[in-house]
Each structure stands twice: as structure tokens, then as C-alpha cells.
């Protein structure tokens, strides 16, 4: 077996971040259930990609996996190695490096990767899973998660909009509108209540979905449209995701689901859109994610009357939110 790194990366991260992951029992229990369904004791081999402190790999080992390979590129991998020894996990082997950098990795029956962010794909799980499916997974093997769906819903509460528009309230005859516009050309991690959303969240729609059993690209583009039956002011859009870990087993960051350490994303509008019965609003979202540049996002909102005539359109872009 010729398993080794071909590059070296040393991103740093405080252990306290991993404490928040370990404290997320909803996340932990969902992955445990998925692994339990997938592992045949004494038979199944597992790769844990982005292992962190080694929790999922240890779960697999405790569930009876014949062999567990763990991959971690950050310094926390050294912590995971010590934790594996402390737990006498002799069937576990850890590699210090990114899975995509490995030459001739051992083939396994199950690949598990919890490399999900508040924006589902910001930690490059698509790139990770596409590579794992081709090079790590045995024929007929299983990926955990199997795929991800992304949801969006108009925000009808003004509390976050007011927070972002503080520039208007400085007074003293001072105009800070340029800075305000920059603030609104940003996406924000926020925790929403169902009451903040159109239909208390029941109007959420899928704007994007990725099935990891098929070829997927890290760049995503999608839209969603809503027709209202009564008056509403829309201030932006909330987005979240559902990861499908195993048949009948999923993990959600929805405001209507049990809380996790993840929150939702808020995509503001430059100004609220006032909808009347029969009118529609359409959100279009484009994201581009790379290892070098991170995630770029651009979004727009189109407001049409009941006959389909375009009334207004707003376009926002993260590039407009950065200081020059």
C-alpha cells in the first residue's frame, strides 16, 4: 500500500471550535445512527475524512468496523491520534493530510465526512466526496452523507434588516449610505425563528440539491419563487440545508428542526420588497467555492406583479461588501 501525502498544509484552529462540535448531540447522534446502519461488525471498513478529534472514526470502531482510516489536515489530527491511543482503538489508523492529496488510499466500504458549514459546501465537501467516490470507495460502497438539499425562504421580520441599517440612524446630518450598501452586500450567519419567515417556514423551497452518487460541481446556481396570497414585506432570504446520511436518516439546520451548532444564512435586500396578493418574488443564488479563494456568493431578487410583469430587481454580491 502506497498511502502518503503529496502536499503539506497547516491550517490552525483552536480546540474550542471542536468542543462546539462535540457538544452538538443532534449532529453526533445523526451520524452515529447512519454509521450503525452501515457497519457490519468485523466486516465493514471505514474512512473518516476531516476527522477532527476523531469522534466519528471512534464511533465506527466502537460499532465494530474491521478497520477505520482517519484523515485530518489540521493540527487537531495530533489530538485525534492521542485520543485514539487513549481509547485503545487499535483498528484505527490516522493520516496527517487532506484526503485529496493521498496517493493510492486504501479502499473502504464506507466513507464518512462531516465537513459541512453554515453554508453547506464552504468546507469543500463536494470536492471531498467526488474524490472519495472515485478513489476511496469500493464498488457498491456507501457515502455518508449521501447528498445535501439547500432550502430558502423569504424573511418577513425586520429585526435583522434594522440591525444592518444602523448607518441610517447616526443622525447629525451625516450620510453613511455607502457603508450601508456595503453592509447589505454580505451574507450573515443568524439564527431565525419560524415566525421570522414566510408561512412560519412552511413556504421554504429547495433552491439547490447535490446527490453525491453523481458527479457534482462545487459551484452552485439555483432559484426559488414564491407567490403570496396576502400583503408581506420581504427583507431578505434565509437559507439552510438538509444532509441525507442514510435511508430515513437526515440532519437539518432548518429553523424548524432541533437546534444544532450550525445556524442559517441571511441574504439581505438593499431595501424591502412590498408584496401584494398575487405577486411573486424570485430569489436567485450563485456560489463559487474554491480551496484557495473560499466561497463567493451573489444573489438577486425579482418582484413581479400578478400578471408576471417585472416591477423591481435587486442584485447583490459579496464582492461589493469588502473594503476597497
Image (cartoon, rainbow, N blue to C red):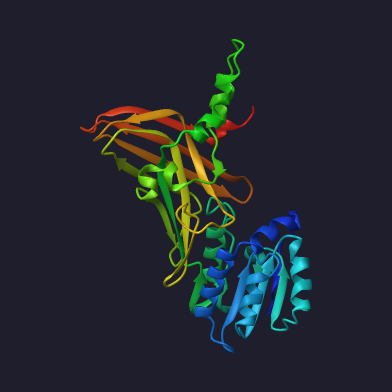
Q: Pinpoint residue 279: horizontal percent, then vertical percent.
A: 27, 34
**Relative to residue 55, is residue 162 depicted above or below?**
above
Picture quadrant of residue 65: bottom right
Q: Pinpoint residue 236: horizontal percent, then vertical percent.
A: 44, 36
Q: Residue at x 49, y 79 (%)?
A: 37
Which residue, as the protein is rendered here, is positioned at the far top?
173
Q: Residue at x 49, y 49 (%)?
A: 219
Q: Is residue 106 left or right of residue 154?
A: right
Q: Pinpoint residue 292: horizontal percent, then vertical percent.
A: 64, 48
Q: Pinpoint residue 295: horizontal percent, then vertical percent.
A: 57, 45
Q: Nearer the viewer, residue 318 or 290?
A: 318
Total residue callouts? 0
Res 320 visible = no
Which residue, as the protein is rendered here, is positioned at the far front?
195
**Relative to residue 46, is residue 22 depicted above or below?**
above
Q: Nearer the viewer, residue 113 or 151?
A: 151
Res 153 visible = yes
Amino acid at each position: 500500500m502506497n498511502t502518503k501525502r503529496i502536499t503539506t498544509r497547516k491550517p490552525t484552529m483552536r480546540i474550542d471550535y471542536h468542543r462546539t462540535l462535540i457538544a452538538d448531540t443532534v449532529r453526533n447522534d445523526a451520524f452515529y445512527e447512519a454509521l450503525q446502519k452501515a457497519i457490519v461488525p468485523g466486516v465493514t471498513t471505514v474512512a473518516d475524512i476531516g476527522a477532527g478529534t476523531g469522534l466519528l472514526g471512534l464511533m465506527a470502531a466502537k460499532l465494530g468496523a474491521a478497520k477505520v482510516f482517519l484523515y485530518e489536515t489540521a493540527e487537531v489530527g495530533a489530538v485525534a491520534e492521542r485520543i485514539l491511543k487513549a481509547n485503545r482503538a487499535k483498528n484505527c489508523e490516522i493520516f496527517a493530510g487532506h484526503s485529496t492529496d493521498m496517493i493510492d488510499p486504501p479502499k473502504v466500504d464506507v466513507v464518512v465526512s462531516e465537513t459541512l458549514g453554515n453554508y453547506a459546501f464552504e468546507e469543500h465537501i463536494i470536492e471531498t466526496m467526488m474524490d472519495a467516490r472515485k478513489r476511496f470507495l469500493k464498488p457498491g460502497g456507501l457515502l455518508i452523507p449521501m447528498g445535501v438539499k439547500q432550502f430558502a425562504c423569504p424573511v418577513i421580520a425586520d429585526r435583522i434588516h434594522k440591525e444592518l441599517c444602523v448607518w441610517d440612524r447616526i443622525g447629525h446630518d451625516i450620510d453613511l449610505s455607502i457603508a450601508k450598501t456595503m453592509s447589505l452586500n454580505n451574507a450573515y450567519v443568524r439564527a431565525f425563528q419560524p415566525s421570522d419567515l414566510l408561512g412560519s417556514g412552511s413556504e421554504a423551497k429547495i433552491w439547490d440539491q447535490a446527490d453525491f452518487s453523481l458527479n457534482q460541481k462545487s459551484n452552485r446556481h439555483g432559484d426559488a419563487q414564491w407567490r403570496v396570497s396576502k400583503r408581506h414585506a420581504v427583507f431578505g432570504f434565509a437559507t439552510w440545508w438538509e444532509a441525507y446520511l442514510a435511508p430515513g436518516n437526515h440532519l437539518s439546520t432548518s429553523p424548524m428542526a432541533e437546534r444544532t451548532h450550525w445556524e442559517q444564512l441571511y441574504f439581505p435586500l438593499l431595501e424591502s420588497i412590498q408584496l401584494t396578493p398575487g405577486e411573486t418574488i424570485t430569489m436567485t443564488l450563485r456560489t463559487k467555492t474554491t480551496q484557495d479563494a473560499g466561497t463567493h456568493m451573489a444573489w438577486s431578487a425579482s418582484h413581479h406583479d400578478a400578471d408576471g410583469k417585472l416591477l423591481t430587481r435587486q442584485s447583490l454580491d459579496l464582492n461589493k461588501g469588502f473594503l476597497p
